[in-house]
Image (cartoon, grey):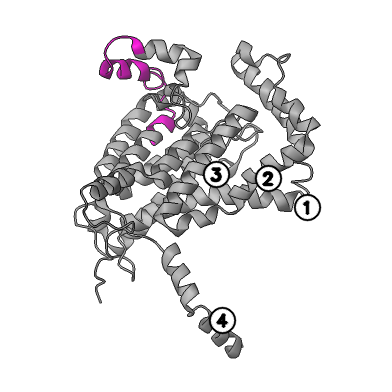
Amino acid sequence: MSSASDKLKACFQKPLWQHLAKQFAIPRFHRFEIVFMRVLYAYVLFQCMPLDAPFSNHGLQIAEAIVPGDSLTAIVSDKDRNQMLRPPLPPISDLLPNSEVKIPYSTQEKPDGIAKFVDLTFFNDDGFVKILPWIVLPCLVLYLSGYGLPIALPILCFVLLGSRTLYNSQGYIHHGFQMVSLILLAQTVVVIWAFVKNPREAMGFKKPSAMTKYGRTWWDVMIRYSQLMIIASYMIPGVVKQFKSGGKWFLNSHYIGVQVVKTHRQNYYNDLDPEWEPDKLPTMAKFMLEHKNWTRLLLGCGVGLQCIAFLALYHRLTWLIFGLMFVSFHYLNDIMFGLFFYHVEKLDWIFLVNLPFWVWWLWKKAKKTPVSLDGPEPLPVKS
């Protein structure tokens, strides 16, 4: 046993493995990156919270106060103009500062997750929903400021996971908020870990220091774990598809045309939008059933991207490349199947594409200032 252990240890000490271990390890982040990611993610969290009116329907009015005139209202009201930034960004209406409405269910018909142990129907109670903004908004302000995260994050985590669990306890699952929730859960775990190790740092009352033996701060760990949740959200479905289908997923992928018809009809009955009328079946469904090999190739590319998503973590440049590929992947799913995950796209932009870093890097290059694609140097580790 010791001989095999020694061989394995020697293998991982080879230059290639050491290089890979270094590249896939937790990176260092610039302070401005962390601030931008925190602010943008807080905005997405606000959009996902079930705060109901007026927070769920006054986003356009707030935006119009910033953009003079009624031009924004006209744009959002026009379906084509609402999509003017797409691709690469989501529709303009989904970028407005609107929260979610109150969870519409007052029972847990088929409890899922923590709903098996906790009655979550209070998320439908009007009295609770009225005080919910007074709980959520101060926590979001704390999150934005970087102070009091050991208090703010667990509360935000419970509100988002609890409300979406109630929504998913009706006999069917909606996973449009899955990635947002996973990132929030990961950040909550990291901040509790940081609080245990150094309470003053975690609360924001002391400058972050090295909390790992490789000189990473707890902020570095939190952002990296956010990235890991994104990658896991892509990889797990891609891999599970193969196991659940007995390896026949690619062979039978053309039958997704039937799912396209189902999604098309669901979209119609959700909003009764004439565009989705049942007799206007999408041409894509017919194409998928008639051109099996082309369908297998197209869908295979998407699932293949999910299966190799872990490669995105290799380097800042691969974050950018894979982030843009994920955004393109969702855009194609939107136009081909009517499946849209705008919150997921926003998270790809925030934590993978990371535009503020690239703007800063290009600005440094334009000034002919020596600049590396790597993050800051590791902090000194206290012995």
Q: Which residue is mark 4?
A: 8
Residue type at numbered disc 4:
Leu
Which is nearer the N-term, disc 1 or disc 3? 3
Residue at disc 4, secondary structure: helix
Q: Which residue is mark 3?
A: 114
- Disc number placed over residue 300 in the picture, else none: 2
Residue 265 location, quadrant: top right
The quadrant of the image that shows the C terminus is bottom left
Q: Where residue 67 sits in the image (x, y, percent)?
A: 28, 17
Which is nearer the N-term, disc 3 or disc 4? 4
Q: Where residue 275 sits in the image (x, y, percent)?
A: 62, 14
Front-most of 155 and 310? 310
Residue type at numbered disc 2:
Gly
Q: How many marks?
A: 4
- Disc number placed over residue 246 in the picture, else none: 1
Q: Can you tell which of label 4 and label 2 is closer to the viewer?
A: 2
Q: From the viewer's perspective, is 308 left or right of 171?
A: left
Q: What is the distance, in whole Å, between disc 3 and disc 4 at their CAs?
A: 41 Å
Q: From the viewer's perspective, is 105 left or right of 298?
A: left
Which is nearer the N-term, disc 2 or disc 3? 3
Please rate how many residues cluster around mark 3, counting C-alpha atoms within 10 Å: few if below 14, some from 14 to 19, many from 20: some
Tell me the residue at 26%/50% (across/down): 365
Front-most of 209 and 256? 256
Tell me the residue at 26%/13% (across/down): 68
Which is nearer the N-term, disc 1 or disc 4? 4
The segment highlighted magenta reads 45-71
Is 243 covered by the magenta stretch? Answer: no
Residue at disc 3, secondary structure: helix
* Image marks 1 and 3: residues in contact by CB distance under 8 Å: no
Front-most of 377 and 1? 377
Q: Where residue 199 sits in the image (x, y, percent)?
A: 26, 58
